[in-house]
Image (cartoon, rainbow, N blue to C red):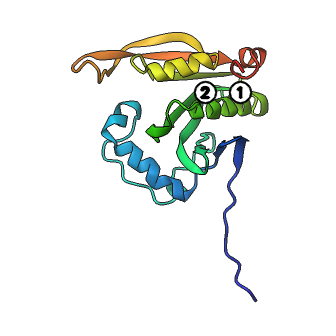
Amino acid sequence: MDEVEDVKQYRIFSADGDVLIRDMEDSDLMAIHDWMTVEEYKPFIRVEPNAKPISSVDEIPEEDTVIRPVVVYRGETQGWISFVPDIADPTAGEVGIFMGVKENWGKGIGPKAMRMFLDILFKEEGIRVVFITTQDWNDRSKRMFDKLGFREAGRLRKMEVDPNRPGEYGDLVMMDVLREEWLDQGSGGE
């Protein structure tokens, strides 16, 4: 009898040209860990200071409701997207995105991936409202989500140290978009 290699199948959430979002694979984990240790990126990522690398996606805690696909551009992992539903109302939740390959910033990969992901959340998963929290000084993030149809919903004042002003605290900005707004504007302003 021939031995059959055990191959794990990964779901591709969505693909559009050179960009796709898919389940996280073991081969993505080292790049993700490396991005988390880049000093320049640390203000953008909330992780434990001494987080150890995970060698297998099987080691990631089982949280059925959290969705964490990776963003792939021309076959190379670029970063990840997440959706964390609200505990009290799973039709609402927070999205996040991190793009680790700096050379590809500004090419529209992040917005395209987030647009595909939000389409899935609103059109297939029945999500009612999605929000983000981002640092007030993170103009790239605010601009991207504004272009996707999010609007500022509030601020948590002086919540995080502002790396651009040592010793000072900056606000966390909350932005949101409702399902009907997303559908009315044709998938994030497209």
Q: Check if mark 2's residue and mark 1's residue have beta carbons within 8 Å.
A: yes
Q: Which residue occupies the foreground of this view, 170 or 74? A: 74
Position in image of residue 28 (x %, y %): 52, 53
Report which residue position mark 1 lands on. Answer: 127
**Residue 87 shows in the view:** no
Who's the residue at 64% across and 16% down the image?
149
Question: Is residue 54 left or right of 49 when viewed as pictured?
Answer: right
Q: Which residue occupies the foreground of this view, 74 or 26? A: 74
CA gap between label 2 and label 1 equals 8 Å
Position in image of residue 125 (x %, y %): 75, 33
Q: Residue furthest bottom?
A: 1
> Identity of the amino acid at label 1?
Ile
Position in image of residue 177 (x %, y %): 64, 17
Q: Disc 2 or 1, which lies upstream in sequence?
A: 2
Position in image of residue 103 (x %, y %): 46, 39
Q: Residues within 10 Å of mark 1 (few under 14, many from 20)?
A: many
Q: How many labels sit on residues? A: 2
**Residue 34 shows in the view:** yes
* Residue 69 lies in quadrant: top right
The quarter in which the N terminus is drawn is: bottom right
The quarter in which the C terminus is drawn is: top right
Report which residue position mark 2 lands on. Answer: 93
Helix or strand or loop: what does disc 1 sit on? Answer: loop
* Residue 135 lies in quadrant: top left
Helix or strand or loop: what does disc 2 sit on? Answer: strand
Who's the residue at 50% across and 56% down the image?
59
Who's the residue at 36% across and 48% down the image?
51
Question: Vertically, is 81 above or below 164?
Answer: below
Q: Residue furthest left?
A: 167
Q: Residues within 10 Å of mark 2 (few under 14, many from 20)?
A: many
> Identity of the amino acid at label 2?
Gly
Question: Vertically, is 9 above or below 15?
Answer: below
